[in-house]
Amino acid sequence: MLRFSSVCLLIALVGWLSAASAQAPHTREHAFGNAEHWAQYFDDPKRDAWQKPHEVIKALALEPDAVLADIGAGTGYFTVRLAHMLPQGRVYAVDTEPDMVKYLADRAKREGLGNVVPVTGTPDSPRLPQKVDLVLLVDVYHHIGERPAYFRNVASMLKPGGRVAIIDFRLDAPNGPPKSERIPPDRIKAELESAGYRLVESHDFLPYQHYLIFAASR
């Protein structure tokens, strides 16, 4: 199974970096220990033009006190926006990279975001400490190894009516991971259905990514 983390966004955000240099040989595991360095890429303000973070969050129609999990949170690009937009809510910022988790904790403290809770996840589970209303994965889906098994695990961590939102690169996007690693929407839908989910909503306002929202079938 792949070890995934939002450091995988490096390929998406830094077009000049090859897939070979971003991944270790054979295992394709991402090995980054300097979150402070990579924050300048992950949180580059220029990303807002195509990532449209506020539109993404608004489309989720979250309750003010929602409990969320940002899986593959990296340096907190979506985490901090969710925390600011939902001050009464709670955001679990999940990452498998220890230095990213430390960075998230330091950033939350520095920015006074008491509703952000960093969590060290594993390739098999986000290890959430409580059930959540929403799980968000941005540019992370294609890095998960045993996806149906992983999302069956995630389903056990959702509240009744909980949802999973997946944003990942389109096959024809000019940036993002190597095209051989991208996953078309039909395959994502099939994999989530096999894990016990149904598609409940989709959006097409992102120029480079598909945006799919699923609910667990109970």
Image: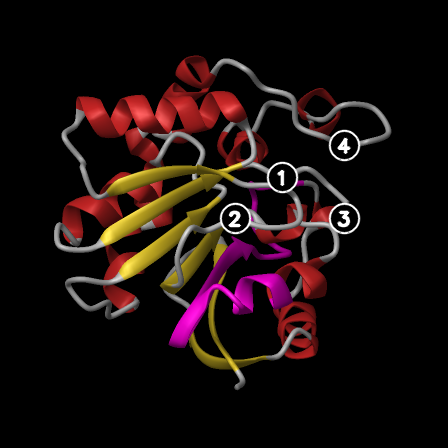
| Residue most extreme to the right | 26
Residue 109 in picture, x, y percent from top left: 21, 25
Q: Earlier in the sequence, mark 4 or mark 3?
A: 4
Q: Residue at x 16, y 51 (%)?
A: 85
Using the numbered discs, state the Cα–Cα distance from disc 2 to disc 1 in whole angstroms: 14 Å
Q: Compared to 133, does 200 lie above or below?
A: below
**Mark toward the viewer: 1 or 3:** 1
Q: Earlier in the sequence, mark 1 or mark 3?
A: 1
| Amino acid type, residue under disc 3 in the picture | Ser
| Amino acid type, residue under disc 1 in the picture | Phe
**Mark toward the viewer: 2 or 4:** 2
Image position of 172 (left or right of 132): right
Q: Please, what secondary structure does the residue beneath circle 1 have? A: loop
**Mark toward the viewer: 4 or 3:** 4
Q: Earlier in the sequence, mark 4 or mark 1?
A: 1
| Residue most extreme to the front | 129
**Mark toward the viewer: 2 or 1:** 2
Q: Mark 4 points at which residue?
A: 28
Q: Mark 2 points at which residue?
A: 127
Q: Residue at x 46, y 51 (%)?
A: 128
Image position of 153 (left or right of 82): right
